[in-house]
Each structure stands twice: as structure tokens, then as C-alpha cells.
């Protein structure tokens, strides 16, 4: 595959720079993984304690154990269609790493950095994405037999955050991991220390079908833009459609220049080698398990804390879709931030980041 697109140049003195590498997941997929892990800093009390322990042979295990409990959770990001892990590496990962949060992301099969397992395939089934996500999350533990070797500890606390179709992939993973019909021993909540889940501008549990019909009723022009942008891949070649779908408005509105759009379009070209198999997904939508009256998933009571974020200027996922996702995840309502669909890019990226920060600060 072509080399992964590097994030824009960062401050050379910034120690929280993303690192891209190819890592074999336990599922057998050779995946593009981006990490942004703040350097470990030993505090003065810890240093004195370690020196005291080494000199006098005292056991500071209980103190170390207590200290480890205060470690900030690892943020694991999952991208959506036309994107890859690079979308998190531009703003979010360096920002959260600068605050002490280890950040990791991997690119799904079919992107330029993560080839499909089946040579030449143009579609990827949702089950493959879920298997890779499960292997990735398990591999974050240094104690796992298929550890990715990222040095996050034996039992890292993880907050899983997905965007767009990445959110729906997470819903399917939650279904298989926490659901009543979990017969797959490879998916167990005991294997992963999941501290929280966040879905941002997520495709709702019912998929794109109902939303597409709503868009058609509201505006044939907007419905055509979405169809042309994704199905015909016009988002890769048409700057106006690309802006409308992902970035909103003009350069002045959201700080995305024409040069930025061209750069992102080159990434979209790279990351649409194979796309999600919508025909297969239609038979396995998360909404099939939702309570008819409440719309809740049957396993929400077993989940860790959850947050759902929508965007004021989202061209792809409408408010009804965001509300559906919130209900499915057991929430009364979502949090709506001032942003276009790509909450992690552009001038207003901090609005979505602030929502994440507030959530993880309360864990």
C-alpha cells in the first residue's frame, strides 16, 4: 500500500508527536496504528520512594499499585468512512497527550494503511471491522498474548471513542461483547478494562437508510450531494461537495483552506480502497436488537459510562439520527456541539474535544 499520510508538521519541541507504524493485530490484520503517548515522568515523591526502597529493601508495591490507579485513561479512537487514523492525529491526539492522556488509533481494513485481508476485495464486512477492533483493544494490554507492545500497562483503563461509521462499528462490538447472545469467547468484557464509550456524529443504529429517506424529503439537492459524495466518491474530486459533507461552510467559517481540502481529498482517495459492505450491514444493524418502545439496546445497563455527541452543522448525520443513537445507548439526550461533521478537524475542533474532556474528567 502507499505510505500513510503524515500529520501536518508539529512543533519540533513538542514531545507529544504522533507516531505511525504497522502492527499485526491478534485478528491477523496488519494494521496502521498511530500512537501519541506522553512520556512517563516520575514525580519527586516517587523517585525518593524508589531510592528508599532500593537502599533499605522495603516493599513499595502497595504504594505503586495505588499510584497506578490514578493514571489517566488511554483514549482509543476509531474513524469513519473515507477517513483513517490520521484524522485523529492532527488535533485531538497531540492535544490530549499534552494533558497526560495516552492516545491510540488504528485504521480499519480497506484504508491505504490497512489492506483488506482478502486480496483485491472492494468491500469489507462489519464482522471483520469488529474482530479487528476487539483485537486492537485487547492488544493495548501489555499482558495480552497478542499485545501490541505499546507500553500502556497490563490493564490499561480505556475510553473508546468513535466517529461516524466508526461509531456504528463500536455499537456492533458492544453488542457482541456485552450482549445476551455473546457466544464468541474472543469477545469478553473481562478482557478489556473499558472505562467509557463516546460516539461522535455516529451513524445511528438503524444505519443510513432512514436518514437517507429523511434527507430526500427535506432536500433533493442535499440528498444528491450525500449520495454523489459517498456512492460516486465525488467527495474525493469535488471540493464543494467535500466541504459540505465534512467541513462545512467556507475557509473563513471553519479554517479549512483549499489546500487543506486537496490534502484531505488525497487521503480520502487513499482510504477508500475498500468500503463497508452495506448489503451485509443491512442484515445486521444494531437497531434490530433495540427495544421497540424505548429504542434502548438490551445491554446498556452493563455498559460503563457513555456519551453521545452531535454537531450543529452536520451534513451527514441529522438530529434525528443523533437522538436515535443517544436512546440506543441509554441516554435521554445527546450533547450537541458547534461543529460540522468532522468534529476533530478545522477551527472548531476544540468544541468536540471539550466534550470529551468533560466526560473523561468525570470518570
Image (tube, grey):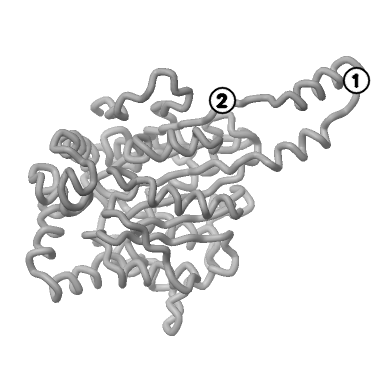
Q: Residue drawn 44% across and 71% down?
A: 333
Q: Residue 81: x, y in percent? A: 27, 49
- Residue plotted at (38% across, 46% down): 350
Camera-side residue of 70 and 292: 70
CA separation, marks 1 and 2?
Answer: 28 Å
The residue shown at (70%, 26%) is 43
**Foreground: disc 1 or disc 2:** 2
Residue behind mark 2: 39
Q: Up-down: is 316 above or below 116?
A: below
What residue occupies the far front of the structure in this picture?
A: 252
Position in image of residue 104 (x %, y %): 46, 37
Q: Quadrant of residue 72?
A: top right
| Residue receiving disc 1 | 57
23, above or below 80, in the image: above
- Quarter of the picture containing the N terminus is top left
Q: Residue at x 31, y 24 (%)?
A: 9
Amino acid at each position: 500500500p502507499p505510505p500513510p499520510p503524515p500529520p501536518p508538521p508539529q512543533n519540533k519541541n513538542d514531545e507529544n508527536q504522533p507516531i505511525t507504524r504497522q502492527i499485526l493485530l491478534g485478528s491477523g490484520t496488519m494494521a496502521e496504528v498511530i500512537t501519541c503517548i506522553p512520556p512517563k515522568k516520575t514525580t519527586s515523591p516517587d523517585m525518593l520512594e524508589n531510592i528508599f526502597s532500593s537502599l533499605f529493601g522495603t516493599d513499595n508495591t502497595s504504594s505503586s499499585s495505588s499510584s497506578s490507579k490514578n493514571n489517566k485513561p488511554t483514549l482509543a479512537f476509531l474513524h469513519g468512512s473515507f477517513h483513517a487514523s490520521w484524522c485523529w492525529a492532527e488535533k485531538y491526539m497531540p492535544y490530549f497527550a499534552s494533558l497526560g492522556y495516552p492516545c491510540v488509533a488504528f485504521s480499519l481494513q480497506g484504508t491505504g494503511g490497512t489492506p483488506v485481508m482478502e486480496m483485491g476485495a472492494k468491500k469489507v464486512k462489519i464482522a471483520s471491522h469488529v474482530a479487528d477492533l476487539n483485537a486492537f483493544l485487547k492488544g493495548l494490554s501489555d499482558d495480552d498474548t497478542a499485545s501490541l507492545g505499546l507500553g500502556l500497562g497490563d490493564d490499561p483503563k480505556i475510553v473508546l471513542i468513535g466517529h461516524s461509521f466508526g461509531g456504528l462499528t463500536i455499537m456492533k462490538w458492544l453488542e457482541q461483547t456485552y450482549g445476551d447472545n455473546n457466544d464468541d469467547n474472543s469477545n469478553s468484557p473481562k478482557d478489556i478494562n473499558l472505562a467509557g464509550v463516546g460516539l461522535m456524529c455516529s451513524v445511528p443504529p438503524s444505519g443510513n437508510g432512514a436518514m437517507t429517506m429523511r434527507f430526500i424529503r427535506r432536500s433533493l439537492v442535499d440528498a444528491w450531494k450525500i449520495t454523489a459524495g459517498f456512492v460516486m466518491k465525488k467527495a474525493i474530486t469535488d471540493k464543494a461537495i467535500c466541504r459540505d459533507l465534512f467541513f462545512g461552510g467556507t475557509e473563513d467559517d471553519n479554517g479549512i483552506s483549499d489546500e487543506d481540502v486537496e490534502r484531505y481529498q488525497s487521503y480520502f482517495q487513499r482510504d477508500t480502497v475498500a468500503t463497508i459492505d452495506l448489503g451485509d450491514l443491512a442484515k445486521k444493524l444494531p437497531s434490530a436488537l433495540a427495544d421497540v418502545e424505548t429504542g434502548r439496546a438490551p445491554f446498556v445497563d452493563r455498559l460503563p459510562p457513555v456519551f453521545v455527541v452531535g454537531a450543529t452543522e452536520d451534513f451527514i448525520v441529522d438530529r434525528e439520527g443523533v437522538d436515535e443513537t443517544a436512546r440506543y445507548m441509554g441516554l435521554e439526550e445527546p450533547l450537541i456541539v458547534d461543529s460540522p461533521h468532522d468534529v476533530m478537524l478545522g477551527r472548531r475542533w476544540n468544541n468536540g474535544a471539550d466534550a470529551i474532556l468533560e466526560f473523561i474528567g468525570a470518570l
